[in-house]
Image (cartoon, rainbow, N blue to C red):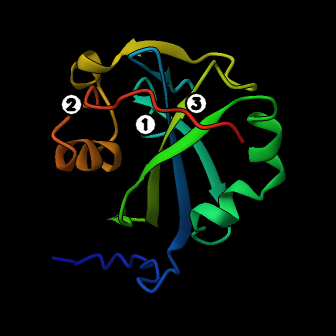
Amino acid sequence: MRLKIISFQLKPRNRKKRKRYLHYLVFHYNGKVYCRKRQGKDIWQNLFEFYLYESKKLLSARKLESTPFFTEMLQGINYRIHYISPVYKQQLTHQQLSGRFFEIIVDHKPAGMEGFIAIEENRISTLAMPRFILSYLHEKNVNLNTLKAGIKDR
């Protein structure tokens, strides 16, 4: 009897994981929060998310407010950063996610929010969301409706 030997090439296990730095902007207006349903073909397809800004490193609120995207988005809008979360992390097979959530009270819908819908704050817990966002909501007790609308002019 003859044995046939088959060899398989193994993939290297020491692949460098891509690091991503996420800044979720949770806009509150009139008892509602803006979310959108992801359409891209990735693992978060058809899940809801808040406005996402990604950068090359984690940003403080001051650094975030000085970015061109932030100043353009909130130009002419009265806003107040109500809450800044601690850093959340999630390890995926091919990437490492680190990020913060910035809860921002606004006096009207910011620019660049096409595709975002206003969801009642007490309905946020009914939406399908990525685990990264769910970790944040769980720690916040999923109830975002405890905010009061104290907006200061900027």
Q: Are marks 2 and 1 in contact (CB under 8 Å)?
A: no
Looking at the rendering, in which quadrant would you find the N terminus? bottom left
Q: Which residue is mark 2?
A: 143
Above or below, 6 against 68 in this view is below
- Residue 21: percent from left, percent from top: 55, 64
What crowding class fits label 1: few (fewer than 14 Cα within 10 Å), some (14-19), or many (20 or more)?
A: some
Mark 3 or 2: in front is 2
What crowding class fits label 2: few (fewer than 14 Cα within 10 Å), some (14-19), or many (20 or more)?
A: some
Q: Which residue is mark 3?
A: 40
Left or right relative to 116: residue 122: left
Mark 2 or 1: in front is 2
Image-quadrant location for residue 64 = bottom right
Q: Are marks 1 and 3 in contact (CB under 8 Å)?
A: yes
Give the structural element (helix, strand or loop) at label 2.
loop
- Residue located 27% across and 25% down the image: 145
Give the structural element (helix, strand or loop) at label 3.
loop
What crowding class fits label 3: few (fewer than 14 Cα within 10 Å), some (14-19), or many (20 or more)?
A: few
- Residue located 45% across and 78% down the image: 9
Give the structural element (helix, strand or loop) at label 1.
loop
Q: Are marks 3 and 2 in contact (CB under 8 Å)?
A: no
Left or right relative to 129: residue 95: right
- Residue located 53% across and 56% down the image: 22
**Numbered tag placed on residue 44 in the rendering:** 1
Give the Cα distance between marks 3 and 2: 28 Å
Amino acid marked by disc 3: Gly
Looking at the rendering, in which quadrant would you find the C terminus? top right
**Numbered tag placed on residue 135 in the rendering:** none
- Residue located 48% across and 34% down the image: 50
Precedes in sequence: disc 2 or disc 1 = 1
- Residue 32: percent from left, percent from top: 41, 17
Amino acid marked by disc 1: Trp
- Residue 13: percent from left, percent from top: 41, 82
